[in-house]
Image (cartoon, coloured by chain):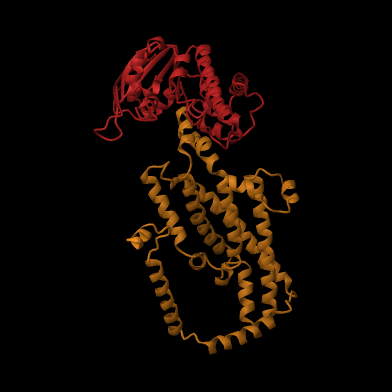
Chain colours: A orange, B red
Amino acid sequence: MNSAAATAQDPFPRSVWPRVGGVLLAIYVVYACAQMEISWERVEVGLHNAAHFFSRLFPPNFSRWELLVKGLLESLQIAVLASTLGILLALPVGLAAARNLMPAWVTWPARIIIVMARSFHPVIVAILFVKAVGFGALAGILALTVASIGFIGKLFTEAIEEISEKQVEAVRATGAPFASVLWFGVLPQVFSRFIGFATYQLDSNLRNSTMVGIVGAGGVGGTLFAAFQRFDYDYVCAILISIIALIMVGELLAQAVRAIFIDNATLRDFVRRGGTASRERHLEDD
Amino acid sequence: MLTLKHLAKSYVAGKPVLTDINLEIAAQGVTAIIGPSGTGKSTLIRCINRLVEPSAGEILFDGEDLVKLSRAELRHARRHIGMVFQEYNLVERLTVMENLLSGRLGYVSSWRAWRRKFPPEDIRKAFELLDTVGLAGFAHRRADALSGGQRQRVGIARAVMQEPKLLLADEPTSSLDPKTSVEIMDLLAGVGRARNIPVLINMHDVELAKRFADRIVGMSGGRVIFDGPPANLSDDILKQIYGGEDWLQ
């Protein structure tokens, strides 16, 4: 009787299913290792190779810096153009996909566009565009534009679907036409989040733009791939260091944009704070 | 001015929220609608400008039946009906001035609204109104930086910017402290007097209703069960409206 009462009062009732799931996962990991013939000997050989490879990476060789800078600049252009184009296209698509504002016959086509744009990794889309429009930066720009439409479109739609209906209702009650309801009732509520998505996408496009070159869609990725194939590992190292530098600069820029638009800071505030967006305002805004 | 005839509303078929509401609102004066929570006061107010679509009946406003209007016609009619909300419903991220000017959106093209190109006359009026509601100097503050009472003043000013012929208020003081509530009621009644327009207010504070209204409409179970001057609102009638009597002591 006592034990029954104790069970009834268990403050943390546990389900058996998470444990069953954990055991099954562990069994599968062991099975997959066996299937792929991963053994300790292989890891040892691999580590030895890795040590050799890493020793050849250093010191980095910047002697062919002109080619490197050309590739980086092209990557930057791909990222900026794809982000601009993608953001401009994602705005109307994301708006059209919002179910709280638009009728079903508008949201469905818009949702299909977003799902299609999100279906494939940018590298796969880049391969398609290389086949379609030929080698070069144009293919990279188009591929990353598609990725941007998918990502920003989806997040923007979700942001719009989460807005406060009350504010929209109030603007509607003034007799405002639909477009004005959007300008005054909807967009102010999602603007700062949209800026957040856009800067994040610029950041992401910058990283992806260094990669689409591997499949011939322009940018520093092509240079990197060629260096790998010629075993110019010291040059590979120089390229990797440059890419890290580029991404860091991009990150700083994105933070500056966010600080100015979301936190209403001035550029000088931003520099004074040492380049970080203030956390408190961020929490309040999200 | 405003006549409701046989107005009915049910959100779910067979469960009416409003049943056969007949009301005549005169060209001026404050009318308070009182009644227990969930009795359809908000629905009634929202039916008038069709934020909620009525299920049956007529709403005659200036001789026109609002229920029959097309979307574009409804938009035009809404410009003449100002509305004040319980939770202020300001656009939080816009400035006080932008919130005020959004009262003019029915008169300004979307293209001009987008570029914030409001007629100078509207802008002048907006600054004047800010003065009137006691918020001079707040024009460039963001709405989310204001206190509840200040927000409701902006809400009232936004409605007045429409140059309405009728002012609706849905529980305008329910989120405010007693002192601010009185100030807001004072402001609403004052606006109605100054502009010679009728004010229709939903509230559940009986004392406040008695103090400010020229006429009280008591509702219970989706029907009007009292309609008359505050002086006629006896304890017996209050018992009928709210049920029970213990709360009256």
Residue A232 at least partly seen: no
Frontmost residue, A92 versus A155? A155
In the rendered image, residue A105, in percent from the top left (x then y), is placed at: 36, 45
Frontmost residue, B103 versus B137? B137
Quadrant housing residue A165: top left
Classify A185 as above or below B173: below
Residue plotted at (64% across, 45% down): A263
What is the residue that sits farthest to the front in this orientation?
A2
For residue A130, side relative to residue A103 (left or right): right
Residue plotted at (48% across, 66% down): A128
Quadrant where the image shows the N terminus of chain A: bottom left
Quadrant housing residue A112: bottom left
Residue B236 at least partly seen: yes
Frontmost residue, B177 versus B212? B177
What is the residue that sits farthest to the left in this orientation?
B14
Classify A171 as above or below A197: above
Residue plotted at (63% across, 28% down): B139
Classify B92 as above or below B74: below
For residue A22, side relative to residue B223 (left or right): right
In the rendered image, residue A30, in percent from the top left (x then y), is placed at: 44, 81
In the rendered image, residue B55, in percent from the top left (x then y), is placed at: 29, 28
Classify A270 as above or below B187: below
Marks counted in the figure total: 0
For residue B90, side relative to residue B23 (left or right): right
Residue plotted at (61% across, 61% down): A206
In the rendered image, residue A63, in percent from the top left (x then y), is placed at: 75, 75
